[in-house]
Image (cartoon, grey):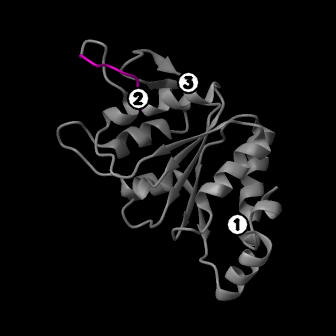
């Protein structure tokens, strides 16, 4: 499936297959979250979609570009007007599954808010090795995310804190060469 949808990138495909094999063998999320890092247009999102298809899971994308409010991910408490669940719970609802692949797109472009909390801290909580205790403010009780596969994308690693990088299995996607681009036009477009 990866070969039919993606040209070249043999090392990337090998790392993806190894990651998927660990997930399949352990039948649960084994810890580190795969981060596909590379320049725009390198195929990060399409690889994540291929992973979801290969694993038979729905793929739900959460764009984190420009998000500077922790409540975006964690939700708001029901005592407030217009209370709603965070995007993680929303992804479970839209994916109609408790075991989707959730694509955390552009995690390097998140902002930070003193007033409403840092979304990176919520991500650290979500991506913790024990994912059975995530509490969405709207629901108010622990939600088991241990069967959810998280895959993240980033254009650059520089904005990510060392603590967040430590929780990620970083897979670098090299940019396409001129020869690769010609082959893509001939065989894939």
Q: Quadrant of residue 173?
A: bottom right
Q: Which residue occupies 72% across, 76% down?
A: 185
Q: CA distance from mark 3 to mark 2?
A: 11 Å
- Where disc 1 sits, the SS reads helix
Determine crowd level at label 2: few under 14, some 14-19, many 20+ residues with C-alpha closer than 10 A: some
Q: CA distance from mark 2 to mark 1?
A: 32 Å
Seen in the image, is 59 located left or right of residue 23? left
Highlighted range, magenta: 81-86
> Farthest residue in the left direction?
115
Reading the image, the residue beneath label 3 is 93
Q: Position of residue 141 (x, y in %)?
A: 44, 15
Image quarter where the N terminus lies is bottom right
Seen in the image, is 1 located left or right of residue 107? right
Asked if the magenta segment contains residue 84, the reply would be yes
- Where disc 3 sits, the SS reads helix
Q: Which residue occupies 49% across, 26% down?
A: 89
Reading the image, the residue beneath label 2 is 86
Q: Is residue 5 above or below residue 8?
A: above
- Where disc 2 sits, the SS reads loop
Seen in the image, is 65 located left or right of residue 32? left
Reading the image, the residue beneath label 1 is 12
Image quarter where the C terminus lies is bottom right
């Amino acid at each position: 499936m990866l070969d039919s949808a993606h040209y070249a990138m043999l090392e990337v495909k090998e790392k993806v297959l190894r990651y998927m094999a660990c997930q399949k063998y352990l039948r649960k999320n084994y810890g580190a979250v795969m981060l596909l890092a590379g320049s725009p247009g390198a195929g990060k999102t399409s690889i994540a979609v291929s992973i979801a298809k290969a694993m038979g899971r729905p793929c739900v994308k959460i764009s984190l570009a420009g998000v500077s409010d922790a409540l975006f991910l964690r939700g708001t408490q029901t005592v407030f007007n217009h209370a709603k669940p965070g995007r993680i719970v929303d992804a479970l609802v839209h994916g109609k599954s408790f075991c989707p692949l959730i694509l955390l797109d552009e995690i390097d472009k998140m902002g930070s808010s003193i007033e409403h909390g840092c979304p990176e801290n919520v991500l650290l909580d979500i991506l913790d090795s024990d994912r059975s205790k995530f509490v969405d403010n709207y629901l108010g009780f622990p939600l088991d995310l241990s069967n959810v596969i998280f895959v993240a994308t980033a254009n650059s690693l520089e904005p990510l804190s060392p603590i967040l990088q430590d929780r990620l299995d970083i897979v670098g996607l090299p940019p396409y060469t001129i020869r690769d681009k010609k082959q893509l036009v001939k065989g894939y477009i």
